[in-house]
Image (cartoon, grey):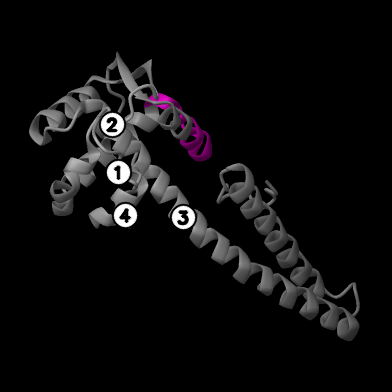
Amino acid sequence: MKKKNSKDDQDLIRESGISLDELPLTPKKVQKPTRTTFNLEKKTYEILSSLCSNYGMKQKEFIDDVVVPNVLAIVAVTEFQKIISKWQYGDQPGNYERKTFVLSKESLNKLKELSKNTGVHRDRLFTIGVSLQKVVLDERNKKHQKAFEILEELSHHINVIEKKCKKLLGNADPIPQRIGIVAVILDNLLMAIEAELNRGVPIDGDDFSQQG
């Protein structure tokens, strides 16, 4: 049996040098659907399900718009060819499970073509595409955690300013009233960020009343 590498997919993705900022979620036109069966590690199915929930996307949409474009992006990275031997399929017999997914014919054909061109099993490429988005999400969450800490400090300052303005102008004055509205919106955003980080609830950029 081949010796298992101590690094997981996400470690290898970070080593590949791919720019995570160049992987936007870009909607595509609807493609004719098809079904295919993958044989993946159970943890890959769990990650896929979690990502779909976090991004608020259906599984087919996520596969077509995120997973397959991720595979295209990382295969194009020069460093991928250097570490390709670490990404072989079936290194852990017994941890795999067969499941049938719906995806577009275009996506399925792209996976087959990439597998043929790279020599990497189609299902392994699919796993890499899922793992890459997990890395993207983890990196985003790290930045959102830092943003949360900055906004938490800002919220404290706004509350202090609001109290000072109320003392100076009175509760009925429009200035402290408007500051109070800003404070509420900011507090709602902080709760929405917490919900995203703790429970994977997506933040709605248009809903200023969202609290998680």
Q: Residue 5's mark?
A: 1
Badge 4 marks a residue whose secondary structure is helix
* Image location (x, y in percent) of residue 19: 28, 57
The amino acid at mark 4 is Arg
Above or below — where is 60 with respect to 78? above
Quadrant housing residue 67: top left
Which residues are drawn in magenta? 49-60
Residue count near mark 3 (Cα–Cα under 10 Å), binned few <14, some 14–19, many ≥20: some
Residue 162, horizontal then vertical, whole percent:
80, 76
Q: Position of residue 55 (x, y in %)?
A: 48, 39
| Prevailing SS of the magenta stretch | helix
Q: Are marks 1 and 2 in contact (CB under 8 Å)?
A: yes
Query: Nearer the observer, disc 4 or disc 2?
Result: 2
Residue that mark 4 sits on: 14
Residue 201 horizontal/vertical position (percent): 60, 42
Residue underneath mark 3 = 140
Few, some or many C-alpha atoms within 10 Å of disc 1 (few <14, some 14-19, many ≥20)?
Answer: few
Front label number (3 vs 2) = 2
10 Å crowding of disc 2: few (<14), some (14-19), many (20+)? some
Q: Label 1 is placed on what type of residue?
A: Asn
Marks 4, 3: nearer the viewer: 4
**Disc on the earlier residue, 3 or 2:** 2
Foreground: disc 4 or disc 1: 1
Ranked by sequence position, the earlier of labels 1 and 2 is 1
On the question of residue 125 being in view, the answer is: yes
Task: Assign a secondary structure to mark 2.
Answer: loop
Task: Locate the N terminus by quadrant.
Answer: top left
Q: Which residue is mark 2?
A: 91
